[in-house]
Amino acid sequence: MTEAYRAMQQRATPANLFLSSVRLHFVEDQRAWEYFQDVQFKYGRRELSVQDFLHRNAVLLQRDTDLLKQLFPFLAPFSASVVTNANYITLTVSHPQQPNQQLVVRRAAEPASTAYYRTFLAS
C-alpha cells in the first residue's frame, strides 16, 4: 500500500467516501453526475426545499435515506419511506410540522439515475 493511499484513507470521512461512491455510481452517466452536483449547488443557494433535496438525492442515488440523514444532518427531523415495485419507485417524505410530500418515479429500462435526470430536465 502506498503512503499516499494510506494518507487518503486516514483523511477519509463518511461524506468523502459517499461522494466517491456516487462518482463511481455515475461513471458511465456524466449527465446524471452533473445533475447530482447541480442538486447540491441549488440546495446550497437555497433554491430547493429540504424535501426536494431529499427526494432528488434519495431517488437519484437509490440509497437508503438513513445514510443520507447521516451525511446531511439537517435531514434528521425528516422521515422517509421508499416503496418499490416492478414499475415505480415511490418516496414519501414526512415531517412533524409539515405536510407529507410524495414523489413517484417510473422505473425505466435505463438506469434510474438517468431516468430521474431526464424527468426533471423535461419539467
Image: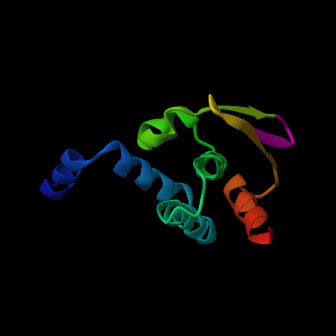
Q: Give the range drawn in magenta.
A: 85-94
Residue lying at the far left in this picture: please name it: 3
Drawn side of residue 18 relative to residue 38, left or right: left
Drawn side of residue 121 relative to residue 31, left or right: right
Q: In this view, does 122 lie above or below 83?
A: below
Q: How is the image coloured?
A: rainbow
Residue lying at the far front in this picture: please name it: 97
Q: Residue at x 61, y 45 (%)?
A: 58
Q: In this view, does 123 lie above or below 116?
A: below
Residue 72 pos. (x, y %): 44, 44
Asked if the stretch drawn in magenta spans residue 97, the answer is: no
Determine if residue 121 is in view. Answer: yes
Residue 59 pos. (x, y %): 67, 47
Determine if residue 92 is in view. Answer: no
Q: Is residue 121 above or below residue 55?
A: below
Q: Residue at x 46, y 41 (%)?
A: 74
Q: Which of 14 and 41 is in front in this view?
A: 41
Drawn side of residue 44 relative to residue 93, left or right: left
Residue 68 pos. (x, y %): 50, 41
Q: Main secondary structure of the magenta part?
A: strand
Q: In this view, does 115 lie above or below 121?
A: above
Looking at the rendered image, the quarter that the C terminus falls into is: bottom right
Number of numbered discs: 0
Q: Residue at x 16, y 58 (%)?
A: 4
Q: Which residue is drawn at 51% across and 60% down?
A: 40
Residue lying at the far right in this picture: please name it: 87
Residue 119 pos. (x, y %): 78, 62
